[in-house]
Image (cartoon, helix red, strand yellow):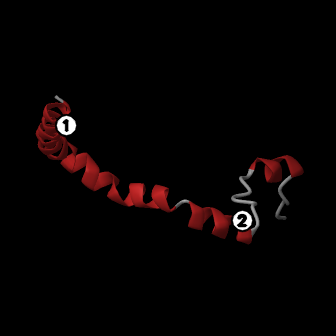
């Protein structure tokens, strides 16, 4: 004889995403920056060092031009 699972066992199982489909679609479309960030995460982890090392001197030069133009 096969036993049916008790009600306690049914309550312990995860139900999954219970939001309506229109809500999930809206949330997915409004979260474009988050999706882009997830796609670029691996690339960013690999390239953050060179990006910062190149951008820092450029920002210093721009800051120097701004300071000299204010004098």
User: In the displayed structure, does residue 71 sit left or right of residue 29?
Assistant: left
Around disc 2, counting alpha carbons within 10 Å, would you say few (fewer than 14), some (14 to 19), or many (20 or more)?
Answer: few
Compare residues 28 and 68 and report the one nearer the observer: 68
Per the image, the residue denoted by label 2 is: 23
- Return the x and y of residue 3 as percentages of the image width and height: 84, 59
User: In the displayed structure, does residue 34 sit left or right of residue 17?
Assistant: left
Question: What residue is shown at x 16% (from left), y 28% (from top)?
Answer: 71
Question: What residue is shown at x 26% (from left), y 47% (from top)?
Answer: 45
Q: Is residue 27 above or below residue 44?
A: below
Q: Quadrant of the N terminus?
A: bottom right
Compare residues 67 and 35 and report the one nearer the observer: 67
Per the image, the residue denoted by label 1 is: 66
Around disc 1, counting alpha carbons within 10 Å, would you say few (fewer than 14), some (14 to 19), or many (20 or more)?
Answer: few
Q: Give the mark nearer the N terminus: 1 vs 2.
A: 2
Q: Is residue 25 above or below residue 71?
A: below
User: In the displayed structure, does residue 48 sit left or right of residue 39?
Assistant: left
Q: Is residue 14 above or below residue 64?
A: below
Farthest right residue? Answer: 7
Question: What residue is shown at x 83% (from left), y 56% (from top)?
Answer: 5
- Asked which secondary structure carries label 1, the reply is helix
- Return the x and y of residue 37 as percentages of the image width and height: 40, 55
């Amino acid at each position: 004889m096969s036993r049916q699972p008790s009600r306690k066992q049914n309550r312990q199982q995860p139900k999954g995403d219970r939001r309506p489909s229109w809500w999930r679609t809206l949330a997915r479309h409004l979260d474009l920056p988050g999706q882009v960030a997830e796609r670029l995460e691996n690339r960013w982890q690999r390239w953050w060092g060179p990006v910062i090392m190149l951008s820092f001197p450029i920002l210093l030069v721009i800051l120097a031009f701004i300071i000299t133009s204010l004098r």
